Amino acid sequence: MPAFSVPNSCLFRFAVVLCFAALGLAGDPYVFYDLTVSYLTASPLGVKQKVIGVNGQFPGPILNVTTNWNVVANVKNDLDEPLLITWNGVQHRKNSWQDGVSGTNCPIPAGWNWTYQFQVKDQIGSFFYFPSLGIQRAAGGYGGIIINNRDIIPLPFGFPDGDITLFISDWYTKSHKEMREDLENGVGLGSPDGVLFNGLGPYRYDNGLVPDGIPYSIVTVDPGKTYRLRVHNVGTSTSLNFRIQNHNLLLVETEGSYTVQQNYTSMDIHVGQSYSFLVTMDQNASSDYYIVASPRFVNSSDWTKAVGVAVLHYTNSQGPVAGPLPDLPNENDKFFSMSQAKSVRWNVTASAARPNPQGSFKYGDITVTDVYVILNRPAELIDGKWHTTLNGISYLAPATPLKLAEQFDIPGVFKLDFPNRLMDRPAKVDTSVINGSYKAFVEIIFQNNDTTVQSYHLDGYAFFVVGMDYGLWTENSRSTYNKWDGVARCTTQVFPGAWTAILVFLDNAGIWNLRAQNLDSWYLGQEVYISVVNPEITDKTELSVPDNTIYCGALSPLQKDQSQRVNFSKGTPQFPRTVQTAVIAIVAAIIQTLMTW
């Protein structure tokens, strides 16, 4: 899949901004994107259906930026329902206004646009964006985010010969709206109809399982070269095992952290997770090779058809790939995947932006100030409707987003009373928020009482994954924690009947979403928000409410019409008057110098 390029209409402006940034006049560079989200007709599994595309593409374009750049993304909603885009893994330092989830932003109404503006501060790595409302991601709407190192920060590996993004996802031929109705009626999603690679169905590896005529993804490579593959599981609810026939996967990065470099023959990638591998094309190219994504932790025979297969094509290949797929790890060995997850460790010697505590490699020695044991449960009836819960509470999204309610002191919208353990009381539906202390060092244990793998994501932060095991977590479980090089990431898996422990430093003020990445669990209420407020009002640790904020709920009277919107792709980047004056002066000086040469 080709890397995203800046639209031609922006190239000159973009170059000018970069020049001024190099001169130290305009600060960190700005990059501008127009993203139109709309329905497209596609047939990824041979059946015509509506998918959600971005700029007429499915998947959407890749946003390719560098550490500390400022991203200005003008999102136009051409769907028939409200929309928000969230930037999975981007931390939005001091700026939860740009997070794009229901607790921070009013939805973008159909036919409207809204401009996100955020800085990828002190981050590197592989991430993705997607629509965060109403399980719209099950229909698409996703695209990649690449945050490159600054030139002065070396990569901890040789510069690859190419950079390839792969989106793997389980896929249903039902629409996301039908899937919502099923979940609301207590009907599970069931096995998917297939698994996609970059929005395309499987190569016909088995004539009995794969119909003829389905387009499939081809990754073309040159022999002897090494490529960086960024692999994202953007699916609905299925863990996928990723592998390339006869090729090793050298893991180098996951969700913004360089890892200890280890070879794998395959990798279990859970919903919402992202990995980077270096793959060297060292085979003899007697034929093409399979690239496979197979469902994991499933027992039904219905899942046999749900295998994603793409083709790795050497430019000197002597023929098409044929024969059986490379083997899947033993499905009955429940410890294989957990052991593999524990083997993913942080490269503490690599030069790169670091998760907080800034510069500290001794997170295991920092005193924990708060502990939350968060227990999930499968969907259950609460007041006659189906819900999923965390610590017995199913999240109810209020009409007024939490962040706006906090900003404008609107009472009664939410309560700072989320319990740190499951309470002995009936499950309920409520808008209960975690009261996070600013700069607290928090231990969170996810206990999975469901029968499927769940993955959990925290916006605004990278957290340290320090432990996981089967059974119930106890105080004694801390003796098994990795207190030195647990990987820092934003999405972690929790195996059925097991627990996962993370540590996170709450130094990023704002309101931040903690959610199940599995869309069925998320849609039915498995999420909570963490409110992190700096009590020192003289210390500006949060950016102000954006001028273009959309207002809804109790604040609807403040909403201006859409004539107030800004379309950056057709305007010019706006800088403070002092900066504009300095820019004009330096341009004049440069022109005068050139005229005297």
Image (cartoon, rainbow, N blue to C red):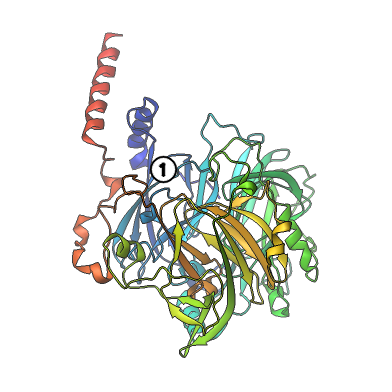
In-front residue for pair 342/433: 433
**Which percent across, then down, holds residue 291?**
70, 57
**Mark 1 burial class by Cα count in 10 Å: few <14, some 14-19, many 20+:** some
82 or 324: nearer the viewer: 82
**Residue 342: percent from left, percent from top:** 72, 55
Quarter of the rendering occupied by the C terminus: top left
Q: Is residue 150 left or right of residue 398?
A: right
Which element type, helix, strand or loop, lies under badge 1? loop
Q: Residue at coordinates 32% horizontally, 65% vertically from top-left? A: 106
Query: Residue reaching furthest top?
Result: 597
Q: How many marks?
A: 1
Q: Residue at x 29, y 47 (%)?
A: 568
Q: Is residue 546 visible?
A: yes
Q: Picture coordinates of residue 59 (x, y %)?
A: 50, 58
Q: Could you tell me which residue is drawn at 37 percent across and 30 percent down?
A: 21
Amino acid at dot 1:
Val
Instruction: State the residue in front, 212 or 71.
Output: 71
Residue position for label 1: 6
Question: Is residue 152 toward the left or the right of residue 414 in the image?
Answer: right
Residue 102, position as x, y percentages in the image: 39, 66
Which quarter of the picture shows residue 354?
A: top right
Q: Is residue 12 left or right of residue 582?
A: right
Residue at image x 47%, y 90%?
A: 384
Q: Is residue 273 visible?
A: no
* Picture quadrant of residue 303: bottom right
Q: Is residue 588 above or below residue 514?
A: above
